[in-house]
Amino acid sequence: MSKTFYKYLGKTEDWPHLSDVYPSSLTYDDVYLVPQTSPVASRSVVDTSIEFGPYKLEKPIISAPMDTISGEKMIRELARLGAIGTLPRGDLEERVSICNRLSFEEIPCVYAVGLKHGFEEASELKRNGAKVVVVDVAHGGSLQAQELAKEIKKKLKLTVVVGNIVTHTEIESYKKHNIDIAKVGVGPGGLCKTRVVAGTGFPQLSAIFETSGSGLPIIADGGIKQAGDMAKAIAAGATMVMIGSLFAGTDETPGEYTMNGKKIARGQASIEYMRDNNISTNEFRAAEGISVEVDPKGPVHRIVEMLMGGLRSAMTYAGATNIKEYQKKAQFIMVTTSAQREGVPWIKNVV
């Protein structure tokens, strides 16, 4: 993964040893990727494939385990596109039925399990063909979640993802618990308000820098608002990106259209989700997500194409033909707020 920052006149420095910059303060908007002399003649020759547990994916994209984002229809379409979907927590009988259908057709999928009955859920899902599970908790640094993941991996021989975390210390603990893949990001999601409610979080790009040198594959979860954010996340060392809000409103998301012609998108920690799943909010549990109506966006393949087009362009700018080469060659540069504004289309209609 690249942690190289361009300074000037060919001089560089490496994160976290950055001049006049607090190393843990960086978000996607704080940086650009630097164009370089490139031997890559065409975006079509760029290889974006990755290894993800037992699967080889053409595109480093995974859907978030959210009940208004990723259901069976989304999972099937992402598989067709060369990416992968996550089936969120919910009614076990329904999830097992979906797992059985997907496994019979050899459609890759990650299955979310919770803390309370996580081992039993993982066991039942494995019996129906599951190969990868994610212990899906708000605080992936929880030792209870890590112990559960260790038990699932040891006894069921499944590939285990756990999250979410943000620091070097946490991912080193993951390695001690033999966790396969870490989900990284606390608070950057478009439907998340953890940083507002709990005052807790970590700037997302710095979180990727913190964790990507561990040797464990990481999923950058949250904060992907546009294709350039994905390009930055992968360059910084993420194996893949998790998409939630950006998929909201696409045809493949679960749920019907409202009378306003929109779709509901909600965080799994929203009041609406907790109410529908008999989870109480009180002094021991706060709502850390929101629920919104979003405009229809059409088929999800348009969003995937946008993301992949941006990643392919970034790779050619860096002179890289595959992900590993890209993560080695990419360079970042710090930008001012003026530079951020300069980088956004600004021209108005001209008579």
Image (tube, rainbow, N blue to C red):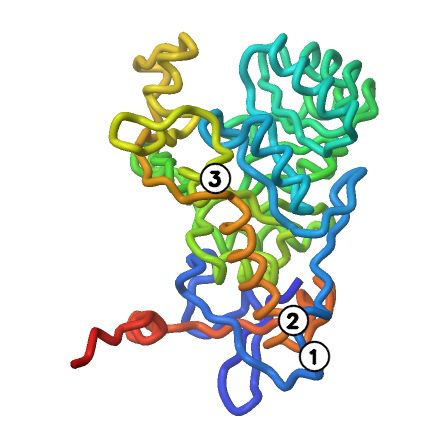
Q: Badges 2 and 1: C-beta atoms under 8 Å apart? A: yes
Residue 254 picture location, percent across and down: 47, 27
Q: Amino acid at mark 2?
A: Arg
Q: CA distance from mark 3 to mark 2?
A: 26 Å
Please give the residue where the numbered disc 2 appears in the rendered image: 43
Based on the displayed image, in which of its 4 quarters is residue 250 positioned?
top left
Please give the residue where the numbered disc 3 appears in the rendered image: 244
Q: Amino acid at mark 3?
A: Gly
SS for dot 1: loop
Does any portion of residue 170 appear in the rendered image? no
SS for dot 2: helix
Please give the residue where the numbered disc 1 appears in the rendered image: 40
Q: CA distance from mark 2 to mark 1?
A: 8 Å
Residue 46 picture location, percent across and down: 70, 67
Q: Amino acid at mark 1?
A: Val
Q: Residue at x 42, y 52 (%)?
A: 225
Please determine whether, in this image, residue 39 is positioned above or below residue 250. Answer: below
Relative depth, front residue between 44 and 87? 44
Residue 79 picture location, percent across and down: 67, 39
Q: Residues within 10 Å of mark 2 (few under 14, many from 20)?
A: some
